[in-house]
Amino acid sequence: MEFTVLDAVDIFIVAYVIYKLMNVIRGTRATTLIKGLAVVFVASLVAQALALQTVSWLLEQSTTVIFVALPIVFYPELRRALEQIGRGQFFAKFGSSSKDQVQTVIDVVVKVAVTLSARRVGILIAIERETGLQEFVETGILLDALISTELLANVFEPNSPLHDGAVIIRSERIMGAACFLPLTESSLDSQLGTRHRAAVGLSEQTDALIIVVSEETGAISLAVGGQLRRYLTESRLTEQLQAYLHRSDEPFRFRRG
């Protein structure tokens, strides 16, 4: 069979589309699911090579169930891809934040947290890292505004329309406000309210950093990895955010446009 130029073009187009699809799901929970599928696929190959019939049969049945469930599991990502195609953004480039931008986010978040803590104004801020938070952004009011101390503080002013709910930050931009976050089912201190439960809940499902200020006590807390670190000082909060966000050269990944 002769390999022609059209065959090369065909392969290039398919490879490019797959690459763009991977970009669409990059930074979302779908990435973790795909890694799980890869492990199952490799395990199936190993089982077949070793002639482990029972294990091979179980993996084959599991694979069938997984592929049937894929459209449901990946529904948010599929919808997002179709929306980007419709808006002509499917071929948009990805960007990443510089260290200066990361430090700007840290400085603004810490300043707002400390200022509103002194006034006992409740806040809930989620900083996106590798796992995308777009599905939670879409539950609130879309802003997509450059972060600033004034804007972030104003969002949480009591009796303002955006006061309740969470602010979600991606790179140096405030993507949404008044967003709904999943509540944890873990047992927490009875004195902790909905904001703290939402912070822990999101940290259990994603790698986001969630900052909470209590209305009752003004205490500043940080939720990460399903754990809640309470009674943080200004310096301690800064240290914690720097430790997580400066861990790599590209702590944020986001879509431009």
Image: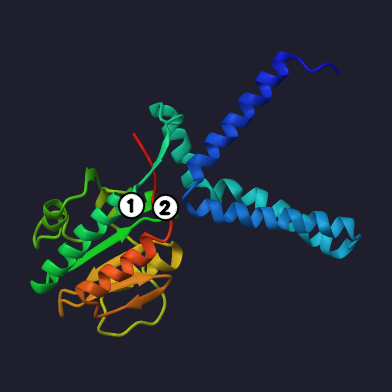
From the image, which quarter does the N terminus lie in? top right
From the image, which quarter does the C terminus lie in? top left
Q: Residue at x 45, y 64 (%)?
A: 205
Which of the 4 quarters of the picture holds residue 145?
top left
Which of the 4 quarters of the picture holds residue 188?
bottom left
Tell me, yes or no, if residue 178 can be seen here.
no
Which of the 4 quarters of the picture holds residue 88?
top left
In this rendering, the answer to whether 117 lies above or below 49 is below
Residue that mark 1 sits on? 99
Left/right placement of residue 83 relative to residue 121 reads right
Q: Secondary structure at mark 1?
A: helix
Q: Residue at x 21, y 76 (%)?
A: 233
Amino acid on which the number 1 mark rests in the picture? Lys
In this rendering, the answer to whether 145 lies above or below 239 is above
Left/right placement of residue 216 relative to residue 172 reads left
- Label 2 Cα crowd, 10 Å radius (few <14 / some 14-19 / many 20+): few
Q: Earlier in the sequence, mark 2 or mark 1?
A: 1
| Marks 2/1: CA–CA distance | 7 Å
Contact between marks 2 and 1 (CB within 8 A): the answer is: yes
Q: Residue at x 57, y 31 (%)?
A: 17
Q: Residue at x 34, y 76 (%)?
A: 228
Amino acid on which the number 2 mark rests in the picture? Asp
Depth check, front residue: 249 or 139:
249
Residue 161, position in %: x, y? 13, 54
Residue that mark 2 sits on? 249
